[in-house]
Image (tube, grey):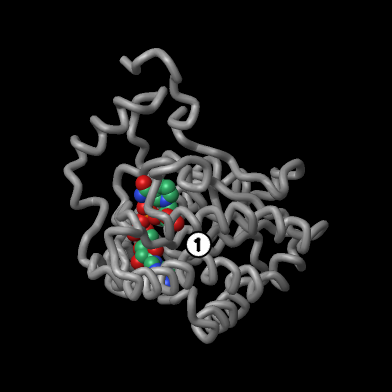
Amino acid sequence: MLQNHTILITGAGSGLGLGIAKYCKAQGAQVIVTDIDQDKLQLIASAFDEQDLLLRCDVTQIADLYACKSAIQAKYSKLDAVIGAQGIFDGNLPIQSMTAEHLDQLFDEMFHVNVKGYLLTAHIFASLLKASNGALVFTTSTAAYAADGGGAVYTATKGAIRSLIQQLAFEFAPEIRVNGVAPAAIGNSQLKGPKALNLDHQKQSDIPKDAFLNLFQSISLLQDLPDAEDYGAIYAFLASQHNKVMTGQTIVADQGLLNRAVLTQAH
Ligand SMILES: NC(=O)c1ccc[n+]([C@@H]2O[C@H](COP(=O)([O-])OP(=O)(O)OC[C@H]3O[C@@H](n4cnc5c(N)ncnc54)[C@H](O)[C@@H]3O)[C@@H](O)[C@H]2O)c1
């Protein structure tokens, strides 16, 4: 699927982004794996080789993104796709459970990473993607489609990404295809809470996998809790030159969660 493709994945130190990076590599791509967390990059380095590039990059920092762009230009002749996978989570907390000051800080922190990070990345890499008739692939969530997929602020960030996919597809047409994926749950995610709520030490992977699996089995049609790599094929297709037919769309990859039965109880 991805022979001769060079693909940048942001927020790829763990979870979804790492799974996508491994999948893209297995499909023949050269991958640029970036994350804010240098320790994670060191831990995963053995999964990649000299054809690839592992770089620390905070997507909220313009200087980091330009440094990443320069490193890509120095090593490769082109960039075919940028896949955005970074994110932080608000722990599903209702806004009434926090002070107005916490909400204020939470909003800024979450929107910086979950929305501004995607916008800046799109802005800075657009010239390379235009030159290759490339693709942008963003990560939203089922939280953008139904209540209780997160708290109000997380949900708002994911709704913003869903809208940005449509707007940027319009702005970047016809050279760049812009699409997104809305996952429901990821088994090996390390999704962290925000500093604003003192939850940055808590990870989704702290929830026992069995408990998460049981919950997901009880509410989704396909009754499985996918691992990050299971999402790889969708991202790989949207990032590839094989996609000549889709732009401005989000694929809801939710194991049938949103289409669950209204009247009949799940098995
Ligand atoms: N885990 C789920 O169930 C789930 C469901 C739907 C959508 N998502 C979305 O999937 C994406 C990936 O999440 P995940 O579950 O794999 O979590 P994860 O924490 O394992 O991966 C996210 C990565 O983003 C990195 N990151 C955070 N801030 C960054 C920044 N400023 N710059 C660069 N990198 C940064 C983290 O260090 C981490 O490695 C997120 O956008 C998340 O909202 C997750």
**In front: 195, or 24?**
195
| Amino acid type at image mark 1 | Ile
Secondary structure of the residue carrying numbered label 1: strand
Q: Is residue 119 left or right of residue 103?
A: right
Ligand number 1: quarter of image: bottom left
**In front: 51, or 236?**
236
Residue drawn 44% across and 74% down?
A: 108
Expressed as whole percent of the image width and height from the top left, the position of residue 214 reads: 23, 30
Residue at which label 1 appears? 9
Residue drawn 27% across and 59% down?
A: 97
Task: Sort mark 1 into few (<14), some (14-19) or many (20+) by Cα contacts within 10 Å.
Answer: many
In the image as oriented, which residue stretches furthest toward the bottom? 63
Expressed as whole percent of the image width and height from the top left, the position of residue 142 reads: 47, 43
Residue drawn 42% across and 67% down?
A: 110
Residue drawn 80% across and 58% down?
A: 173
Expressed as whole percent of the image width and height from the top left, the position of residue 223 reads: 35, 25
Can you see residue 70? Answer: yes
Q: Is residue 149 left or right of residue 136?
A: left
Image quadrant occupied by the C terminus:
top left
Image quadrant occupied by the N terminus:
top right
Q: How many numbered circles does the render carry?
A: 1
Cβ of mark 1 under 8 Å from ligand 1: the answer is no
Say if 236 sits above or below 93 in the image.
Answer: above
Expressed as whole percent of the image width and height from the top left, the position of residue 17 reads: 43, 56
In the image as oriented, which residue stretches furthest toward the right? 174
Can you see residue 55? Answer: no
Q: Is residue 4 left or right of residue 89?
A: right
